[in-house]
Image (tube, rainbow, N blue to C red):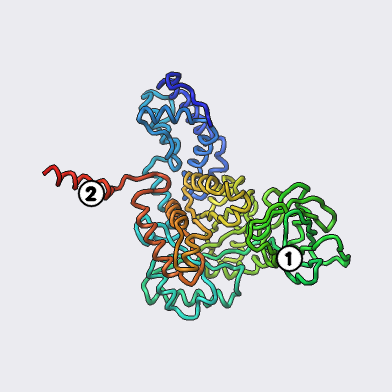
Amino acid sequence: MMTLTPPDVFTNESVAQQLVEIGKEMEEAEDLYSDLLSALHPNFRRSGTNLLHYLILRSKEIREIQEYLHQAGLSSLTNSESHTLSQVKNVLSWLNHNHPLSPLGGCDFTTALWLRQSNAERLLGIYPVQDRPHIMVTFSAEMMIESALVEQMLNEGMSIARINCAHDKEEDWLKMIEVLRKAEFKTGKTCKIYMDLAGPKIRVRSIAPLKATEKKQLKLKEGMELTLRYRASGKKTEENDVIYVEPREILSCVRVGEPIVFDDGKFEATVVKVDPGAVVVRVVRISAKKPVLKPEKGINLPNSDLKIAALTPDDLRNIPFICKYADMVGYSFVISPEDVDHLRAELEKNGNGRRPSIILKIERLGAIKNLPGLLLNGMKDESLGVMIARGDLAVEIGFERLSEIQEEILWICEAAHVPVIWATQVLETMNKTGYATRSEITDAAMGSRAECVMLNKGPYIVKTISMLDDILTRQMGHVHKKRYIMRPLNIARKFLETQAIRIV
């Protein structure tokens, strides 16, 4: 817990001086990073400048200043993400009317609001309901038997269709698109298409257990050791059960002591030995009722320096189809600005003048560390979005840190005026069973701070869309991004009305 300085140590003059110094650093950053800012698309130049201002503000320890400002009844800069330097100047004008910062420069609140909405509508389309986030729904081949289901989905509030290129084939994707277009025509609704690149599949390819009775799956217990290999080497491994993994590169990326996590966090192991072509790990945690590891389950290496290309050969083969039909392309496994350059080049090469907008999927620790650089590179394009892919992200950073990190991503994207998609397991139980848990309702309401909320496929998808629409619409009366709005409360109105009747 931070120890606060006694309030009488601060004065208007001392706080103003600290803010002036921060403001000057923001103004100097515009010159320092002028080449970087000039490379941005005109749609994002003011946004990129504001992002730099915000990063400077958030690099400072200002909590004591905030407390002083709050007690003085002034803005504590807590909601300044979208218009940072402008807000600093506004506060200074109350503390010291003669502050030396330039009256020009900085993105004011009204401009920021317009930029955020323009960038969101350019990427995602016109909001179906005023300020209510878009609802994205994942499609699958089995959903596409006929268009009646898709018509219901559109009528309940779906405005973006997601096609995951990790599943099905081009002919299936084309069928999904055809059914969607027919449903659009019949309902009069419009719906954009988002396609996810699969990215590298870091997973268990197959299992060779010591006990033949276990066949293709393996019962794990804490303390047991496993050998990871890329494929059978001809050697017979007697001492350990063998897990064949892909891609090959992960075996050379890990170091002794680093964690390896299997099956969405259900099993965690630690690397105890690294040999050419083989890695030995020891199981240290099991968080599953049935401790059985099966093929095709994912692998996460949160602390390893992964040198794996973000675009796979399959991704490259799918890009021409994506360029032809998709409005947005989700970039899985993106980590560095160079990754963005690579995808942009492939889209330009295959697009024939038509290019889907890039959605940066933040699902790796490296992507979080490089988020400002990823945004500033992506802002060279006409439109850009970010997806908080909370499934892999939670495994990468630890479930206990997810709420903190997803907040940080929302803040930084708001500073850049870049729209955000809130994804992974939203109303998942509702979608599977028809009944939502209490925690799911709260999580779905948090999605109101993004510009789009993603649902997975499920047998109760129509009911789930309807519930999500209701939750988001209600929540938008109370919260805009992370700023609370004082909508008239029925609780307050009814109490006062009741009291008035009693008095009469």
Asked if residue 237 can be seen in this view, the reply is yes
* Image quadrant assignment for residue 108: top left
User: In screen coordinates, is 236 left or right of 473?
Assistant: right
The amino acid on which the numbered mark 2 sits, given as a three-letter code, is Lys
Q: Residues within 10 Å of mark 1 (few under 14, many from 20)?
A: many
Disc 1, disc 2: CB below 8 Å? no
- Name the residue carrying label 1: 218
Disc 1 marks which amino acid? Leu
Depicted 488 relative to depicted 201: above or below: above
Q: Position of residue 245 (x, y in %)?
A: 74, 62
* SS type, badge 2: helix
Q: Is residue 311 visible?
A: no
Rendered view: 155 above or below 89: below
Residue drawn at x 37%, y 70% as measured from the top left: 155
Looking at the rendered structure, which numbered label has been put on residue 46? none
Which residue is the extreme one toward the top? 9
Tell me where residue 52 appears, x and y as whole percent: 52, 39
Direction from residue 398 to residue 113 in the image, left or right = left
Residue shown at the point (63%, 49%) measured from the top left? 365
Q: Secondary structure at mark 1?
A: strand
Q: Quadrant of the C terminus?
A: top left
Near-viewer residue (408 or 16) = 408
Q: Earlier in the sequence, mark 1 or mark 2?
A: 1
Quarter of the view holding residue 104: top left
**Camera-side residue: 395 or 38?**
395
Q: Which residue is mark 2?
A: 494
Give the residue drawn at x 51%, y 50%. 41
Of residues 216 and 67, the one nearer the viewer is 216
Q: What is the C-alpha distance between the residues marked 1 and 2?
A: 61 Å
Residue 240: give x, y in percent of width and height.
Answer: 82, 60
Q: How many numbered markers are drawn?
A: 2
Q: Position of residue 33 (x, y in %)?
A: 56, 38
